[in-house]
Image (spheres, rainbow, N blue to C red):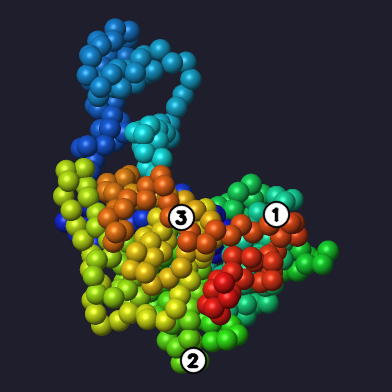
Amino acid sequence: MEENNNGMNPEPKKSSSKFFMGFLVGALVAAAVLLAAFVGYTLVANRTAWVKAKKKQTQTVEEDESYQAKLDTILQYLDAYYVGEYDDEELEMGLSKALLANIGDKYAMYYTPEEFATLLEDSSGEYAGIGVSVVMNEDNEVEIYKVFEGTPAEEAGLQIRDIIISADGETKFKVLDDLVSVVRGEPGTTVDLTVRRNGEEVSFTVPRAKVQTPTVEFELLENGIGYIYISEFDNVTVDQFNKALDSLENQGMESLIIDVRDNPGGDYDTVVAMSDRVLPEGLIISTKDKNGNEKTEMSDEEHQLTLPMVVLINENTASAAELFSGAISDYGLATLVGTNSYGKGVVQSIFRLSDNSGMKFTTEKYYIPSGRCIDGVGLQPDVEVIIPEEAYEDGIITEEEDTQLQKAIEILRGVE
């Protein structure tokens, strides 16, 4: 199950790098034991040793000026004077989250073991679930807005606009994660769902299975114009993108629209591989870390697209999606249409800690082939088109109302 939320591995294997915006992002990472450098864990260990050593009757606290000692001293005061009770694990988690939240990096985050496992699963593009996407509607109800083809959900008969009111007996879903945590599980097991459909309650027992998230949608429009929508750059997206291109080429595609609007980014290796399929031989991306160390990724001459292209971008096109769009634009292969992109020109690394929790924070800046870093600036479209506000009134933008898409079609038809 996928939420509708609107995206680099540390040495020695930096190739599993990651672009992130918000929670949707990720790739499989190697374990990195960073416990000694992570204050939250060290602090709890120190507290345990101190509590064992101190005499319960003493109320004297010796203070030290060092940062680590200060935190330990606070715990000593709490243990000596606080009249309430607190949980060591909850305190550890809070300290860990607070540490990453206060380093001045808006993309930094600490993940509990459960959150970290979900992050890796989401970013892989595969998960064990039933095959639906859900949103929290205006009535704060969990509503199915997409049922993926060939999944247990489709086979069971779940439908778009079904309201999920119960999952394995659970009925209170304040946020989408409350439902997701119940519905996801081991392949081969089942989940009992009750939905409201047309005012009536309908019950289903749905088996869980490995589900691959569709991140690419495509079709051949009139006049031989191919259309590919990429929702994010997950591990599965490369194969989906290549299959889309192959299918459209076999159907006689003469030009192409690539739509990365509202795409938050995703996996570094994925966007590099997809760029290699599109670009001529040459530079795709360069990155620099805090010490000035530079790394480059190159496109080979084996594949490239030479047909006319338009790339659709908007204010929510971010990170890896900006790299992909910017690289295509820098080589003069496509016209950018839409609105100025988000402006995320930095890369985050994700680290697994020894208890299977994890964290991510910014470790590099990236540069598109022209040498520009678009962080805080974004990509400016060649043709700016704003979708009128009235198009959003009913919550659904039709193809005719999508002025950005219509402009792309006009350009490819040769209409000025």
Q: Residue at x 24, y 74 (%)?
A: 281
Q: Look at the numbered disc 2 and give the secondary structure of its residue.
A: loop
Identified by mark 1, the residue type is: Glu
- The mark found on residue 389 in the picture is 1
- Tell me residue 372's x, y (percent): 31, 53
Q: Is residue 164 left or right of residue 61?
A: right
Dot 2, crowdedness within 10 Å: few (<14), some or many (≥20)?
few
Whether label 1 touches label 2, CB < 8 Å: no
Q: Is residue 63 left or right of residue 182?
A: left
Q: Is residue 9 left or right of residue 208?
A: left
Q: Tell me if residue 79 comes above or below residue 347 in the rendering.
A: above
Whether label 3 touches label 2, CB < 8 Å: no
In front: mark 3 or mark 1? 3
Q: Residue at x 32, y 50 (%)?
A: 373
- Tell me residue 216's x, y (percent): 49, 73
In three-dimensional space, the C-alpha distance between marks 3 and 1, rounded to whole angstroms, equals 21 Å
**Residue 272 in view:** yes
In three-dimensional space, the C-alpha distance between marks 1 and 2, rounded to whole angstroms, equals 35 Å
Q: Tell me if residue 13 comes above or below residue 59 in the rendering.
A: below
As drawn, the residue found furthest toward the front would be 416
Mark with earlier residue (1, 2): 2
Q: Look at the numbered disc 3 and give the secondary structure of its residue.
A: loop
Identified by mark 2, the residue type is: Gly
**Residue 270 in view:** no
Whether label 3 touches label 1, CB < 8 Å: no
Q: Quadrant of the N terminus?
A: bottom right
Give the residue at mark 2.
252
- Pick the residue in front: 225 or 274: 225
Location of residue 60 by image quarter: top left
Give the residue at mark 3.
380
